Image: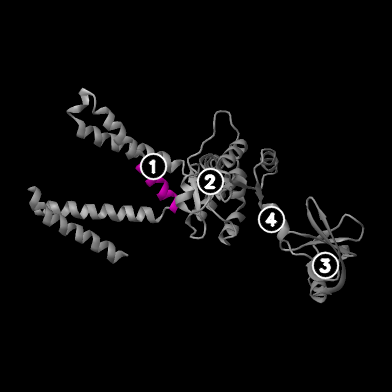
Amino acid sequence: MYVFRALVIIVFGIIGYIGSQSINLQPYMGAIFGALAGFLLIFIEIFLARKSTRDVVSFIFGVSLGMIIANITAFILIMFPPFQNIKQYVFIVANLVFACLFGAFSYYKRYEIKVLDLWVGEKLGGSLKVLDTSSIIDGRIKDIAETEFFEGEIIVPKFVIKELQKLSDSKDHIKRTRGRRGLEILEEMQDSSLIRVRLIDEDLKEDEEVDMALVRLAKRLEAKIITNDYNLNKIASLHGVKILNINELAMKLKPVFLPGEELNIKITKRGKEPGQGVGHLLDGTMVVIEDGANLLGQTVKVSVTSVLQTPAGRIIFTKIKEVKNDRKNRKDS
């Protein structure tokens, strides 16, 4: 591609050099203008390569529609005496103005113009995912998205980025850390070749809260909201917007343990009931060990007796089968 681009610039420079004779321009100036035209073409090619099909199609659609309307408008205007003597300028100005306005409008509203689905070849409604602040700060969304389980693009509105920036500038250390982490995660998602992230220029309306703005945006785009926020989950459900909750997904993906299965677990504290010990799996699942209270700090082999699912998470009840590293633990103690 680098060789091809270099050849394009050279060829355009040669064309400019040769063509300069027909317009009474110095040959070296013609070569410079030709090379600049080549650079402009390369710039456009690189710019388009970074955009999705819908981005490009929406912009071309808007420019084409704008030029059609511009020529109709200009044709009507030149029928009046004040514009008859400058009709060529009327056409030029009208095309430039309408092409820019309609191109920009079509690009910024590309997810709302349903007629674009015919050219793009896919219906984006329902496949778009809108991220809220909590899901970005959480960080797991990046790992999940890189597995390519999500279809369609991930949308991040302007007001979510503003909320992250506000947190990162907070005087509170915890809020500042969370905000900076969110901005870093978002930057990593943008840089990932496996994730399609789009930042859209969507801001809050007057006196509008972030949760309601997310719901309004998701309804307009026919998108789903990815969040860890319990309140947003409830608000979105009331408005008929589908929610993808990362915490719920994590709960569903936790390994299933059946009675009789064996685990190696380190007892870290006493349980609520007399004689119970408590440990945790790597994913945070609580393991209750019968008669394990006197073995704090030791690793034991346990057998699963039952599993209890609670709103706060899953609890595994076990009984001891074997104490691991018992000699070493006694020596250390």
Tell which circle, 4 or 2, labels the residue nearer the N-terminal end: 2
3D distance between C-alphas at marks 4 and 2: 21 Å
Q: Position of residue 217 (x, y in %)?
A: 56, 39
Q: Nearer the viewer, residue 285 or 216?
A: 216
- Residue 156: assigned label: 2
* Residue at the spot of label 4: 249
Q: Is residue 262 magenta?
A: no
The crowd level at tag 3 (other Cα within 10 Å; few <14, some 14-19, many 20+) is few
Tell which circle, 1 or 3, labels the residue nearer the N-terminal end: 1
Span shown in magenta: 53-64
Please state if 109 lies on the left or on the right of 96 as rendered.
Answer: right
Tag in front: 1 or 4? 1
Tell which circle, 3 or 4, labels the residue nearer the N-terminal end: 4
Q: Is residue 83 visible?
A: yes
Query: Which residue sits at x=69%, y=41%?
Result: 237
Query: Which residue sits at x=62%, y=38%?
Result: 211
